[in-house]
Amino acid sequence: MDSTSRPPETDAPAEAVPPAAAAAPAAKGDVEITRPRNDKRGYRRVVLPNDLECLLVSDPDTDKAAASMNVSVGYFCDPEGLEGLAHFLEHMLFYASEKYPIEDSYSKYITEHGGSTNAFTTCEHTNFFFDVNHDCLDDALDRFAQFFIKPLLSADATLREIKAVDSENQKNLLSDPWRMNQLQNHISLESHPYHKFGTGNWDTLEVKPKEKGLDTRLELIKFYDSHYSANLMQLVVYGKESLDNLQTLVENKFCGVKNTGRERFSFPGHPCSSEHLQVLVKAVPIKQGHTLRILWPITPNIRHYKEGPCKYVSHLIGHEGEGSLFYVLKKLGWAMSLEAGEGDWSYEFSFFSVVIKLTDVGHEHMEDIVGLLFRYITLLQTSGTPKWIFDELQTICETGFHYRDKSPPIHYVANISSNMQIYPPEDWLIASSVPSKFSPDAIQGILNELTPDNVRIFWESKKFEGQTNLTEPWYGTSYSVEAVPPSIIQKWVEKAPVEDLHMPKPNIFLPSDLSLKNAEKASFPCMLRKTLFSRVWYKPDTMFFTPKAYIKMDFHCPLSRSSPESSVLTDVFTRLLMDYLNDYAYDAQVAGLYYGVRPNDTGFQITMVGYNDKMRTLLETVIGKIAEFEVKADRFSVIKETITKEYENFKFRQPYQQAFYYCSLILEEQTWAWDEELAAVSQIEASDLEKFLPHLLGKTFIESYFAGNMEPGAVKGVMQHVEDILFNAPVSLCKALLSSQHLTKRIVKLERGLRYYYPALCLNHQDENSCLLHYIQIHQDDLKKNVLLQLLALVAKQPAFHQLRSVEQLGYITLLRQKNDSGVRGLQFIIQSTVKDPANLDARVEAFLTMFEGTLYQMPDTEFKSNVNALIDMKLEKYKNIREESAFFWGEISEGTLKFDRKEVEVAALRDLKKEELIEFFNNHVKVNAPQKKILSIQVYGGLHSSEYEKIVHDEPQPNSYQITDIFSFRRSRPLYGSYKGGVGQMKL
């Protein structure tokens, strides 16, 4: 895959941002900002007298306001011996300011007014952002601005937040992506900041500074005063107000940000010298699997972003169609996936990377794989640069830009403020997403840098255990380094198998019809068609007016979850299906039409989203492939190997993820243990799948949902075609499902007045983190109780975070959230910690609830009303795009609740709600020792708390407590909540 061609991840702004050399000049005057054709929002660039550069976005249709401040300072600026200081400062600015001295008052205000906050630190910038209900922007901005005017940075908070940074780092210590990224940084010049460790920990921020006689807080203040200057900041504010009103707001709030005239930071030179090139680094990962990363230092794409040479090159090297490198490696059974594109980059340096996940056989052919990669690069270097490929890419990128989905404002502002540090004002929105100038020289320039002379090869596998002689200092990764001169690579090229590598063919999935269909007004989905074989729901696009559609198709197959073996075989089938379609459907993905086939609770599901123009063609191809499915033994073995490794790696999941798993296993009927499924995988053969498939598909019902730019007649035609292929063929694959055979997902009903607890050792004994998941089960879908639970979660969320994370510093991952299992609802506390064992964490949750009791009882009526109004505003928030809208409506269909007007009805219930009702709800269901309270405490004990585990499993349970020792015996012994699905076949049109 070309790693630049995925759907835009709006919630993950670019990790590395270059410094001043690419920054826009702070010139005054109006700038014509390039925007999508269908974007009706107003934009204005403003530079305040203190040189703070701002972009104002006026959106009269928005329900949420948002802001983001990008500061052109990152961990490259960390002082020597104070690793993580920039990241630590990001944490500390959230606490308090001179104007708002109460701790966490910023986060409290945002949370209570329907919003959220976050921040991230990268090598060359730090980005702070929030969203809030649109009518609260003024007060929210006032609090936000104080980060950059007069933060408190108190001594008391300093020590506590160092612990939070340390806990964040603890969470990452056994994570392969963090470990391998740091290893790449480590094998570079010590004199270059790329070499640094950016997160920080207890040692770097507390122990080492003290040994040197340094006060971390004073160093933090010094760093803030010398680095945070208005001329190094970029602000985006997004609101419902007019541009003039937004400008007044920003001028009033941010004029107090100091401009020290600090010069922009730049870090010239490349992080790699000759000793860091022509190397093969063998590294031992935490998880099973083999990964090959081939990197080259290249000219940063940002210097030629209008030409987009990296986009062109990564499109070809990352291609997955016939004749591509991945196509050949897959055919040989050597590779599971391939991604190519620009990795770490700044204005001064950049790396082009090719990342290949290898099969076991591929691991034995590493030299051949590298040889084939260089052979393909040579083909590109000597084939010229066909303009039609650039034109096709440009068309795809332009269409993507002009028909871009509206994203949540919080993601939008964070992306744009990051762009403001890099691009001139006219390109703040488009950035480098659309190459506009064809430059064969720039493309050839990048290709000419991808040589054996400056390659870095990182090869990861557990097979290297015991064969390494070096240790990376921050994460403890074992590795070795050996020289790989060009002469060796040339031998690999020569001995690699002869394969038919060639350029891709023109993309047949480019949308040609982007017209909008005539659709009748409809607020909710309607049932368009129902037969013995299928039911079709339809919702035309009456809100977004884009040439896109969304399809969900659930295949209800009773056999799919009947045993661990059938669950695994269904999974193998869906993966094989996508594997067979890959070289054909890859072009669809490149052109903006995405699809997936995945197993689910009742069978398997097809999802499609993107331009509607060629969607029917792709769907019919997928259905055709199901109808004529053959099990190919060679591909079966690769998929089996992939799934086996995933199960083997289950034990390396974070403790909180293991707690989620145990919770699902205890509460959900018809779920199987991971080790049972692993045992099943090891036993299955291709012949088992051949025997299983006719039975799996033999009894099927299809529940589907079509939304967007499609007409009802076309939708009926598509479903008739699907039925004709699968059910009505002379020898039909599928038969109608009997009403008695419909599967439902049902949830265990816990006993009132009892506290169930399940202690388990963390599956990875090296992991020092423990985790508590404290679940309070409350009720099944009920209008009044739903809104009471939602309101309680909103009111308690910030106090829980403040007490358990900010004050008690139990762990970086500390949250309170609602849980909804097939309509069964409750509250969930999740805490991952090295500080206390899970039983102690459980006691801290109970202590918090006792403390919160007083907060709730004493809540002023005005605050209660404010929280109710915030929740109403959140519910009335309009969908941004067809994915969001479809996720809600499909949720109602798949759960069987069909309450398409749920939000409107819940808003009406909220308007009538009284504070006394919320207190009564809390007293009955949540309060400590409440008579109706139902608790499930999942306790995962990490390496630091193994002795506490031994104690709790042998101690007698406390009164009204019950230790679950056998999950399946417990599950069988408990009654279940009813299902809203009833039986699809029984539902009337």
Image (cartoon, rainbow, N blue to C red):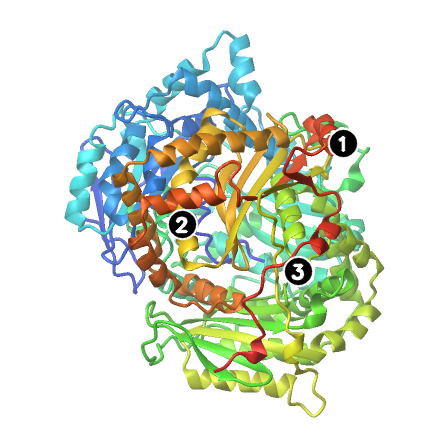
- The quadrant in which residue 72 appears is top left
Position of 984 with respect to 362 (left or right) is: left
Where residue 114 appears, x then y in whole percent? 34, 46
Q: Identify which residue is drawn at 57% across, 40% down.
A: 774
**In the rendered image, the vertical position of residue 624 relative to residue 236, given as above or below:** below
The residue where tag 3 is placed is 325
The residue where tag 1 is placed is 954
Q: Identify which residue is drawn at 76% across, 49% down.
A: 366
Where residue 607 appears, x then y in whole percent? 54, 68
The residue tagged with tag 2: helix, strand or loop? helix
User: Which amino acid type is marked by label 1?
Assistant: His
Q: Nearer the viewer, residue 978 or 871?
A: 978
The residue tagged with tag 1: helix, strand or loop? helix
User: Which amino acid type is marked by label 2?
Assistant: Leu
Position of 249 with respect to 168 (left or right) is: left
Position of 470 with respect to 340 (left or right) is: right
Q: Residues within 10 Å of mark 1 (few under 14, many from 20)?
A: few
Q: Residues within 10 Å of mark 3 (few under 14, many from 20)?
A: many
**In the rendered image, the vertical position of residue 898 relative to residue 925, given as above or below:** below
Q: Identify which residue is drawn at 82% across, 69% down.
A: 688
| Labels in figure, total | 3
User: Which amino acid type is marked by label 3?
Assistant: Leu
Where residue 15 appears, x then y in whole percent? 48, 41
Q: Quick one: label 3 or label 2, which is nearer the N terminus? A: 3
Q: Are marks 3 and 2 in contact (CB under 8 Å)?
A: no
Residue 423 appears in the rendering: no
The residue where tag 2 is placed is 788
Q: Quick one: label 1 or label 3, which is nearer the N terminus? A: 3
Q: Residues within 10 Å of mark 2 (few under 14, many from 20)?
A: many
Q: Nearer the viewer, residue 314 or 646?
A: 646
Residue 972 appears in the rendering: yes
